[in-house]
Amino acid sequence: MFYVLILAMNKAEIKQDLDELEKKIEQLKIDYEKFFVGIINVEPVQLKNQITAIIRKYATKVNQFNNVMLAFRYRNLTQRFLTYQEYWNRILRLIEEGKNPKDYRKLVNEKQKPVFHPKEKDPMEELYKQYVNLMEKQKKEPPSLEAFKQTLAKYEENIKAKYGSDVETNFSFEESEGTVKIKTKIKKKK
């Protein structure tokens, strides 16, 4: 009779410990996810040690369980913990290498960083440089960039008014008799 009472108490204690083990594993899983994304700053080692203590408590006694269901549940929870532990260790190694795949702060910072594209050359500025070089050869004062752009914009408007808005204009310059002349090539857009 006394032996049956001890077995019943052990089954109740084992079941209670397995329930606690399952809850702690789930809590540890949540805590590690929080740690990986930076919500908490300290690895949840204390909870991990509590789980390890429960697993070790029954490691040598699992074959002596009189209840097959409890033995199966213990092995299942132990295997789940070991699988998670391998996963957490892999993520920790990546963090040590500076490659945390779960660091949301990096993703947020990357989205907020402005993307700098190399400055595309403004065709007007290139034309202006050509014009300035030709004017300097003739020892004449070139207009400002803005005045130059306005003048070419007016030429383009006149051409489009005359030939239609579906034309493309390409400007170039040539020296002729002490002056710089604007040459315009007109192409129909396809």
Image (cartoon, rainbow, N blue to C red):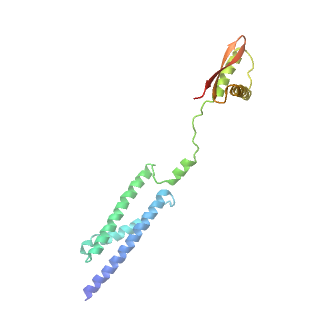
Which quadrant is the C terminus positioned in?
top right
* Left or right position of 8 against 183: left
Where residue 9 sits, quadrant-wise, is: bottom left
Which of 15 and 169 lies nearest the eye of the viewer? 169
* Residue in the foreground of this view, choosing between 74 and 89: 74
Identity of the residue drawn at 26% across and 88% down = 2
The structure residue drawn at horizontal position 27% and vertical position 77%, both measured from the top left corner, is 67
Regarding residue 49, the answer to whether it shows in the image is yes
Residue 61 is drawn in which quadrant?
bottom left
Q: Position of residue 181 (x, y in %)?
A: 70, 17
Percent position of residue 153, x then y: 71, 28
Q: Residue furthest bottom?
A: 1
In the displayed structure image, the side of residue 188 where residue 47 appears, left or right: left
Residue 49 x %, y %: 39, 66
Which is nearer the eye, 60 or 14? Answer: 14
- Is residue 134 placed above or below 146 in the rendered structure? above
Task: Give the x, y percent position of residue 30.
Answer: 45, 64
Q: Is residue 108 above or below residue 30?
A: above
Looking at this rendering, what residue extends furthest in the top direction? 177
Q: 176 or 130: nearer the eye?
A: 176
Task: Please identify the quadrant where the N terminus is shown.
Answer: bottom left
Residue 44 visible in the displayed image:
no
Number of marks in the image? 0
